[in-house]
Amino acid sequence: MSKEILDAVRGLAAEKNISAEKLMEALEDALLSAYKKTPGSAPYARVEMDRETGDFTVWELKIPPELEEQLLVQAAADEGPSVDPETGEMREPAAPEIDLEKLKQYEDQIETADVTPHDFGRIAAQTAKQVILQRIREAERDMMFEEYRDRVGELITGIVQQSDSRYTLVQLRERVEALLPKSEQVDGERYDHAQRIKAVIKDVSNSTKGPSIIVSRRDPELIKSLFELEVPEIADGLVEITGVAREPGYRSKIAVISHVDGVDPVGACVGPRGSRVRMVVSELRGEKIDIIPYNDEPARFVAKALSPARVREVLVDDEAKQATVIVPDDQLSLAIGREGQNARLAARLTGWRIDIRSETDFAAEEVRGDQDEEETSGRCHAILSNGRRCPNAALPGSRYCGIEAHQALEGTGTDQVPADPDGGA
């Protein structure tokens, strides 16, 4: 039986990449614990396993009384009283035990005797099986933790095993499972049994029950990884995704830049007839994606980030990092988006605070701001049909220039020039 145990240990060590010596030492510790539970066992003993034959021997350690008393006193001093973590009360230490490692210093004073029980082979076989299985599980957990702890942010593909109100269990490979918590799921998505899904590894932690792998479908890294999978230019480093702003399940904006002349970053991500971006949208269950060309000039970048809306003008305040965006009246709702989504994503992508104004509102505010200096400015106060103020100088003693339509505004209470059917001012 001992030979069979030895062969099993060596075979498992090679198969599972576990140190054979560690398995041997674990077996010796487990057999010592099993021996101490047998009636009439020696108070101090150790178990040795012959590495060649696989035979086990239990050695009783006969410690001289003076040495035993000295070691027990040292053990009691090292233990000391402790505090109960639940009640906060002081508790007395347990009966001191001599550490077998310390006995190695006094081997010349200690006699040994073979006290191996006659049925120790049966005990050894049962214990060996339990220890080997336990160590295999521990080794597999350690290997799994080592494998996945450096893969945080990486795209993985898994198969849904089960789903409930708290989390979805996803199998990554045989005997390796990950959790997709409710907080990392996209609203409205369903995860059916045996369905194949893609996600990114959010966190890997180790615990007594083994490694815990948390994956996410909400993380912006998911979009980066999916585009890298579909777009060779990104995988090769020719095109880079510089930023992602995402509202999972609804809309995302990504900023892209090309590091090589002649390569269009937006075109590369869209693909022939939109095939590449369509694959990403399909994996994200229909989430809309806007691909924005990155620009070092803030005004141009902010204007592009508000796509699909057309922008007329962008006024930037570099110190406050704020941009005032002027859009045609018919583009205002498109620029802001449903419930402010488009503007919110653009601000998140660019890192700038964005204030969106229609041309009419902006012109009216400009007029109100100019009223305080109307006496000194000398500029005509008429507001043209395009929403801008007339650039001409006002006539002496009048608020308006010499154009008849502008002079006709005097006393009407409004500065807005009526629209001319023939297209004039």
Image (tube, rainbow, N blue to C red):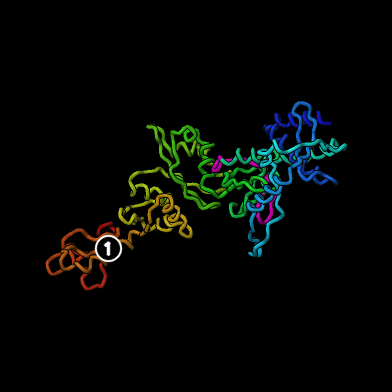
For residue 97, say whether it is visible.
Answer: yes
402 lies left or right of 77: left
* Residue 77, horizontal then vertical, whole percent: 63, 53
* Residue 188, horizontal then vertical, whole percent: 61, 54
> Residue visible at 27% across and 65% down?
416
Q: Find residue 331 and report its image quarter.
A: bottom left
Specify whether residue 38 is painted magenta: no
The amino acid type, in three-letter code, at marker 1 is Glu
Q: Find residue 357 and report its image quarter.
A: bottom left
* Residue 105, horizontal then vertical, whole percent: 65, 38
Residue at the outermost front position = 66
- For the residue pair 340 and 235, the one nearer the viewer reads as 235
Residue at the outermost top position = 52
Tag 1 residue: 366
289 lies left or right of 396: right
Say what secondary structure mark 1 lies in: helix
Residue at the outermost right position = 118
For residue 132, say whether it is visible.
Answer: no
Specify whether residue 155 is painted magenta: yes
* Residue 395, horizontal then vertical, whole percent: 13, 65
Q: Which residues are magenta?
A: 150-168
> Residue visible at 49% across and 49% down?
252
357 lies left or right of 187: left
Image quarter where the C terminus lies is: bottom left
Image quarter where the N terminus lies is: top right
- Is the residue 340 above or below the residue 290 in the image? below
Q: Residues within 10 Å of mark 1 (few under 14, many from 20)?
A: few
> Residue visible at 58% across and 48% down?
216
> Residue visible at 58% across and 41% down?
149
397 lies left or right of 423: left
